[in-house]
Amino acid sequence: NREILTGGKKFAQRNAKKHVVEEVVFDKDSRQDYLTGFHKRKLERQKKAQEFHKEQDRLAKIEERKKAKLEKQKEMAAQLEKFQKSMKELSGQYETSDEEDDGDEDEDKKIDVEEEYEEWDGFQEGEEDHNESKSKGILKRIYAANIGGSDEDGTEVTIEDVEFNNNLEEIAKLNYVNLQKSQKILEESIDRAKKYAVIAGAAPKKSIQKKKKFRYLTKSERRANNRKAIDKKKK
């Protein structure tokens, strides 16, 4: 039993003898490089680490640029969509206003045609006076001058008195302008101009209040403040 129990130890010893190093040979140069190259290897590791960090920073910057580019593209797409919507709205407003103006012009033309084709019942005294007052637009006076009492024809000077028509409604009607809708059209054009200004980036910027700079008190200022505080306490 003793031999069986101690047999494992002998087997282990035999196996250990098989893998024994026969001879240890030291290379003096490599040994010297190892012993004297700690600082050198440390610098090499630092250099590799710096190169690694530089590469990581470069990749991070590329990624940030990609993200910024995508964000700008999204913003531009949103602005373009907004601009197209506003242009559609404005074009719709223009079409409605043009249709209204055309309708007003058609109504005015119909009224003029009806007035032209009214039945004529002859002249009346009141209408004659009214027509005469209307026809008096320009008064002409002719003066003839004969210089030196000669028999030749003299010079004729014509003086015209012009009466100005101050009736704005008639002038507007002649120019196909509807004064009742002028204020509305003006407000719509101002709103459109404001929208165009906002789209073009000409909106008024909000005034930013500057923060007061923090400053430490000087020695003399601190003394003066302390004196004032002491005087107040005494009072």
Image: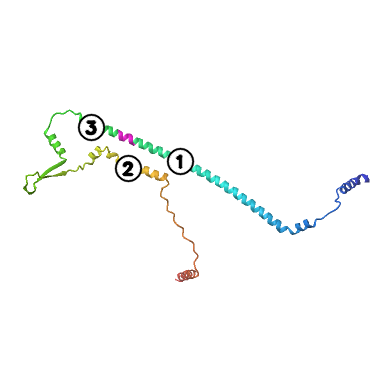
Q: Nearer the viewer, residue 235 or 188?
A: 188
User: In the depicted view, which residue is nearer to us: 72 or 40?
Assistant: 40
- Res 157 quadrant in image: top left
Question: Mark 1, mark 2: which one is toward the viewer?
Answer: 1
Q: Which residue is mark 2?
A: 186
37 relative to 197 in the view: left or right: right
Residue 227 image offset from top left, x and y in percent: 47, 71
> Is the residue 57 above or below the residue 184 in the image?
below
In what quadrant of the picture does the N terminus appear? top right
Q: Position of residue 223 (x, y in %)?
A: 49, 70
Q: Quadrant of residue 182?
A: top left
| Numbered mark located on residue 80 in the image | 1
Q: Which residues are magenta?
A: 97-102
Answer with the quarter of the image where residue 184 lies.
top left
User: Does residue 180 show up magenta in the picture?
Assistant: no
- Can residue 99 be found in the magenta stretch? yes
Task: Label 1, secondary structure: give it.
Answer: helix
Q: Are marks 1 and 2 in contact (CB under 8 Å)?
A: no
Looking at the picture, which amino acid does disc 3 mark? Asp
Residue 112: image tag: 3
Residue type at mark 2 is Leu
Pointer 3 local density, CA inside 10 Å: few below 14, some 14–19, many at least 20: few
Q: Which residue is located at x 93 percent, y 45 percent?
A: 3
Amino acid type at image mark 1:
Leu
Q: CA distance from mark 3 to mark 2?
A: 28 Å
